[in-house]
Amino acid sequence: MKAVHLICRRDGITLLGLSPLKDKKGYFQSCCWAFKDDPSSLIGGWAYLHPVSKKSPSEFGGVVREVLPAKREGKAIEDGYILGPVFS
């Protein structure tokens, strides 16, 4: 099974880019991530969000159920992806 560990900084008490889904209680999506390889291989695998570094424990994670294209405005790599509905 595939897994990805991502650094997801904090904005106060919340993790940046992590949003609850209004139509699915307990589910979230995380946006916007850039990947070198095709991220569709993550579907069915796990994603772990680390607020400080990958060596520190993850604070949020779950099974990736969907990968959708997204734009990363103003970033060096503008093509990004949403992982979701990913966490439950």
Image: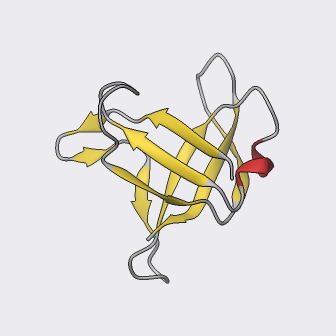
- Tally of marks: 0
Q: Choose between 52 and 29: the one closer to the eye.
A: 52
Left of 37 or right of it: where is 4? Answer: left
Counting from the top left corner in percent of width and height, residue 39 is at 75, 43
Residue that extends furthest to the left in the rendered view of this protein: 12
Question: Is 75 rendered above or below residue 57?
Answer: above
Question: Is 33 rendered above or below residue 24?
Answer: above
Q: Choose between 50 and 20: the one closer to the eye.
A: 50
Counting from the top left corner in percent of width and height, residue 50 is at 36, 37
Question: Is 48 rendered above or below residue 78?
Answer: below
Counting from the top left corner in percent of width and height, residue 61 is at 43, 54
Residue that extends furthest to the top in the rendered view of this protein: 76
Left of 10 or right of it: where is 69? Answer: right
Left of 2 or right of it: where is 58? Answer: left
Residue at image coords 25%, 38%: 11
Residue that extends furthest to the front in the rendered view of this protein: 1
Residue at image coords 17%, 41%: 12
Q: Based on the displayed image, in which of its 4 quarters is residue 26 positioned?
A: bottom left
Left of 8 or right of it: where is 13? Answer: left
Counting from the top left corner in percent of width and height, residue 14 is at 25, 48
Quadrant (top left/top right/bottom left/bottom right) for the C terminus = bottom left
Residue at image coords 40%, 27%: 54
Tell me which colouring the rendered structure shows.
Answer: secondary structure
